[in-house]
Amino acid sequence: MKKSILTVVLLAVTFALTAQTKKVAVWETKCSDNSITGLQSTIVRGGMETAISNAVGFIGYDRTSFDAIIKEHNFQRSGAVKESDIKRLGEMAGVQYIIVPEASTDGSDFYIIVKMLDVETGEFGIAYDVLCGSSASEIKSACVELGTKLFGGYGIVDGHEYVDFNLPSGTLWATCNVGAETPESFGNYYAWGETGNKLMFDWEHYKYANDDCMKLTKYCTNRSFGNEGFVDGLIALQNGDDAASIRWGGNWHMPSKEQWDELLQNTTNKWTVQNGVIGRLFTASNGVSLFLPAAGMHFGSVYTGEKVSGLYWSRSLNSVYPFCAWYFNFDSSGCDILDRSGSGRANGFSIRPVCEK
């Protein structure tokens, strides 16, 4: 049997992959020339619905409820459906995206175009192609492959969601801060090298110093800053002192300076508002996005910087001035990786975990 073509053109706005749950509905499969069977139509639509149900960060809109709205408002199900009508239907249903599959067959070749409408903007985006046979099982398998292409930027490791930017190092970035349940939540704040929650962030209450930044008792590379000349040469947090590793387990850990730099070099970013929270959104060329809230910091007993700046620890020590550690800093003007100013290890910063593929 001649190999048929299942070309899935996804016009998607790169799916706005921002880790919060997005509701997606699937339109009935359209066929302008009536060349496909009812079974083929159902398989394509069902395959797209299954892809949504298996995706992290997305949820499918109930088919029965969606079809009921179409019927109630007399929306055209096949032929030249107006994009404005689809957008209006999405607004009525309260969904963010609508998949509109179109299919036709020419002998043994089976051709499908799947359009994705962003309800908010009414715009379409990029495209993906998949080849498969024309049998039911082959079409189903192709839909699974399509789902991987659509939602492959997300996944779960040890119970925690991640985004995959396809970075050279293979680093996967968590969608939430330690102590947070959503990407927009601030989560907990930690002094560098500490794994427990507390209210006072100063040298008197810091675990690895004798009440003074010049008297470090661990992670010290310079005798001038060590307690009674203490030096251990450690320049990166051990797992037992890594809040991400301790709190999340598995292979999760705090990012290194190099991993923060890789994120910055391989994504674009913008100061934005997501679900009412101010922060920065980082987007890679594969369309996957990551949101970091401007959660501020704790300095002594003072909490400051909320909605103004984000400060996120790395696991990397400042080897020249070991009372400081490298951290990722951003505000409305931009972002950078810093190693000293404001980075005293006793301060309370946010933590965004990473792991590797």
Image (tube, rainbow, N blue to C red):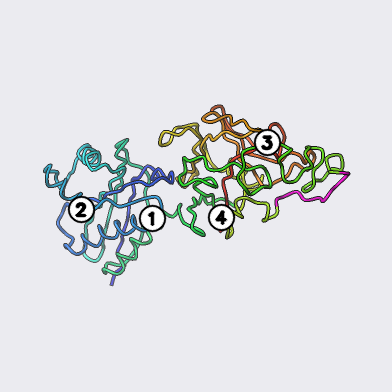
Locate residue 122: give its quadrant.
Answer: top left
* Vertical position of residue 80 compared to residue 132: above or below: above
The image position of residue 328, as x and y in percent, is 62, 38
- Residue at 16% x, 45% y is 69
Disc 3/disc 2 C-alpha distance (Å): 52 Å
User: Who comes first in sequence, dot 3 or dot 2?
Assistant: 2
Residue indicated by mark 3: 338
Mark 4 or mark 1, earlier in chain: 1
Q: Secondary structure at mark 3?
A: strand
Give the magenta range: 228-237
**Which residue is farthest top?**
333
Secondary structure under the numbered disc 1 in the rendered image: loop
**The N terminus - image quarter:** bottom left
Q: Amino acid at mark 4?
A: Trp
Q: Are marks 4 and 1 in contact (CB under 8 Å)?
A: no
10 Å neighbourhood of mark 4: few (<14), some, or many (≥20)?
Answer: some
**Neighbourhood count class around disc 3 (C-alpha, 10 Å): few under 14, some 14–19, many 20 upward:** some
Q: Earlier in the sequence, mark 4 or mark 2?
A: 2
Q: Amino acid at mark 1?
A: Ala
